[in-house]
Image (cartoon, rainbow, N blue to C red):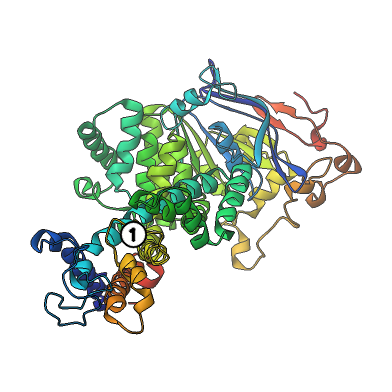
């Protein structure tokens, strides 16, 4: 089903290309992205800077190749954290219901109403802005959606007869939650997790743009952030990293969409 | 039928309440039932009379909250399940007592293969390793009459028909050779021809293993065909209990008479023109059960007393008891 959707396959190919460049690129093309290689703000196609240089004379192409690692790592790791927290809280709330559900959902709403970017900024500034703190901050602010989705799925699935049948053969609560209900709740969660990667990438870019990323690690967000004052005079320093972020998020969204079509039984019948 | 010795399962005084919106509803009220080994007890009644709740209560699976077992004893093989710790219950469920649910279409987990689901019980209760469990799963599928079990064991529930799924459910329930099998309307969702096959299978399995069987149904035809004794439930109470032959030949409670009268008789004249009989009125809501007999407002023979006071159980003959003021003093 997924393979039959050209858009989804396009997204997957795009993402694989971006991953290849970011993971294999630095092994093949050895350079330091913080090195000064050309005159400040050299335009594209200059000597030593095929895509131009930023205001400190750092090569934009090298930045793109090396910066992907940080951006993608943050995206994947933060999405993972947010999905794990979201599933844990949503599952417990949905399965137990009652007071447990009330308390956990109010807690979730508390996180949901906080402006997430501001909250993430506070978290990063409280601790030093390293890759780990950025990952944690993004993960901690972005789980409420997944929690609500998981809770809704658990509320629905726990009423199915096969859950009662499972109880009737003496299964434990843990087994029922994680091995019976969760696998049946996975399709929408997989889609939501995929889209969470895109959101996390954008988050990382926003934090770096505001100067709250890890300054010692090249990332696409950092590139845009450090060159933002020259945006109008030297378009290349911000456009190329911006394009990479755009393509990454687009690829992830297309994959998420394709997975949704493939995993959603209601859409499946339409084809 | 056997009757002698200690019964397999003895329920007495069982009450279940549901709470909601500040009110409580008694969905089971002072229910008493007995099942012996090698005996089939039928529980019959309209929707909402407490049949399924009784089945769930036996395994202590009443959804809680909002439900709560408020009293009574459920003695299974000499042990009161209502007093047993949860740990012990998990060992009874699926092992000593098997249960078959109403809806075979939704009672199997769609993401697991038939073999995985069958094996689960076997691994848990009989401590088989996964290879032995698989071999036993295939045997069980064969025992419940599924063709090509070696192939079916690796299929998913959606690849099977309704009748096949119910057979798989039965295979799961009897996997650990339970002493008691509870079948909650096992054929409601199935075709008539498949129904007959499933009942034949249950009868065969019971005869072979000597287990007790509780068959919950709303179909008097099934009761006549399958059971040794019957409990008629209404409004969360057992209103009449008797050997099946007695119930069919001499129903004592007006409700039981009504149920029997509602079964269309193919040999009788009604077929060629007469109307089908029905019991007028509706089952009272569990949220406002009357103080007296729950059937009073639908009963053609109701007396003022019926509305005011719940009739106690009267024993009419050996094993035949009824809760109705009409039979007061008819104690034998």
The chain ID associated with circle 1 is A
Residue A271 position (above or below residue A177): below
Q: Residue furthest bottom?
A: A233
Asked if one can make out residue B99 in the rendered structure from this viewpoint, the answer is no
From the viewer's perspective, tell me whether residue B34 is left or right of residue A75: right
> In x, y percent, where is residue A75?
33, 59
Residue A176 position (above or below residue A205): above
Q: Residue at x 48, y 58 (%)?
A: A121
Q: Residue at x 75, y 57 (%)?
A: B280
Quadrant in which the C terminus of chain A is drawn:
bottom left
* SS for callout 1: helix
Which quadrant holds residue A224?
bottom left
Residue carrying label 1: A75
Q: How packed is label 1: few (under 14 Cα within 10 Å), some, or many (20 or more)?
A: many
Comparing A240 with B178, the one in front is A240
Quadrant in which the N terminus of chain A is drawn:
bottom left
Q: Residue furthest front?
A: A39
From the viewer's perspective, tell me whether residue B313 is left or right of residue A183: right
């Amino acid at each position: 089903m997924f393979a039959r959707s050209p858009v989804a396959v396009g997204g997957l190919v795009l993402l694989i290309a971006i991953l290849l460049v970011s993971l294999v690129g630095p092994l093949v093309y050895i350079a330091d992205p913080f090195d000064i290689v050309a005159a400040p703000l050299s335009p594209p196609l200059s000597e030593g800077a095929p895509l131009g240089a930023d205001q400190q004379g750092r090569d934009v192409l090298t930045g793109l190749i090396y910066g992907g690692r940080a951006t993608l790592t943050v995206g994947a790791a933060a999405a993972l954290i947010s999905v794990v927290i979201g599933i844990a809280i949503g599952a417990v709330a949905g399965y137990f219901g009652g007071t447990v559900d009330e308390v956990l959902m109010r807690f979730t709403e508390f996180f949901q109403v906080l402006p997430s970017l501001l909250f993430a900024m506070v978290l990063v500034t409280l601790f030093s802005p390293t890759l780990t703190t950025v990952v944690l901050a993004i993960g901690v602010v972005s789980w409420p959606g997944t929690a609500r989705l998981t809770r809704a799925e658990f509320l629905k699935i726990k009423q199915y007869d096969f859950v009662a049948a499972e109880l009737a053969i003496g299964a434990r609560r843990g087994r029922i939650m994680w091995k019976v209900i969760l696998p049946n709740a996975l399709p929408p969660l997989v889609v939501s997790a995929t889209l969470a990667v895109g959101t996390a990438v954008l988050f990382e870019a926003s934090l770096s743009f505001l100067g709250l990323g890890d300054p010692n690690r090249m990332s696409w967000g950092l590139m845009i952030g450090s060159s933002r004052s020259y945006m109008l005079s030297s378009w290349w320093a911000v456009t190329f990293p911006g394009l990479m972020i755009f393509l990454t998020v687009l690829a992830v969204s297309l994959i998420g969409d394709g997975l949704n079509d493939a995993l959603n039984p209601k859409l499946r019948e339409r084809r | 039928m056997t009757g002698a010795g200690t019964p397999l399962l003895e329920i007495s005084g069982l009450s279940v309440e549901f709470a909601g919106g500040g009110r409580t509803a008694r969905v089971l009220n002072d229910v008493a039932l007995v099942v012996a080994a090698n005996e089939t007890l039928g529980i019959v009644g309209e929707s909402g009379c407490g049949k399924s709740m009784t089945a769930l209560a036996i395994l202590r699976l009443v959804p809680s909250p909002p439900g709560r077992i408020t009293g009574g004893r459920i003695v299974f093989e000499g042990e009161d399940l209502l007093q047993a710790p949860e740990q012990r219950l998990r060992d009874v469920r699926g092992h000593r007592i098997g249960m078959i649910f109403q809806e075979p279409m939704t009672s199997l987990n769609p993401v697991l293969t038939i073999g995985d689901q069958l094996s689960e019980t076997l691994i848990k209760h009989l401590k088989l390793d996964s290879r032995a469990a698989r071999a036993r799963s295939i045997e069980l599928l064969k025992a419940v009459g599924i063709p090509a079990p070696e192939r079916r064991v690796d299929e998913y529930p959606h690849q099977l028909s309704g009748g096949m799924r119910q057979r798989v459910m039965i295979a799961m329930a009897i996997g650990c050779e339970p002493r008691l099998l509870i079948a909650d309307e096992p054929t409601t969702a199935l075709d008539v021809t498949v129904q007959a096959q499933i009942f034949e299978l249950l009868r065969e399995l019971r005869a072979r293993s000597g287990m007790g069987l509780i068959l919950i149904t709303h179909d008097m035809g099934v009761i006549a065909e399958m059971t040794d004794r019957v409990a008629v439930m209404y409004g969360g109470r057992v209103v009449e209990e008797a050997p099946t032959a007695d119930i069919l030949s001499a129903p004592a409670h007006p409700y039981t008479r009504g149920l029997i009268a509602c079964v269309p008789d193919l040999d009788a004249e009604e077929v060629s023109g007469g109307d089908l009989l029905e019991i007028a009125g509706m089952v009272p809501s569990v949220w406002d059960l009357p103080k007296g007999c729950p059937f009073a407002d639908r009963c053609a023979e109701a007396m003022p007393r019926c509305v005011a006071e719940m009739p106690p159980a009267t024993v009419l003959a050996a094993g035949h008891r009824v809760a109705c003021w009409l039979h007061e003093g008819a104690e034998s």
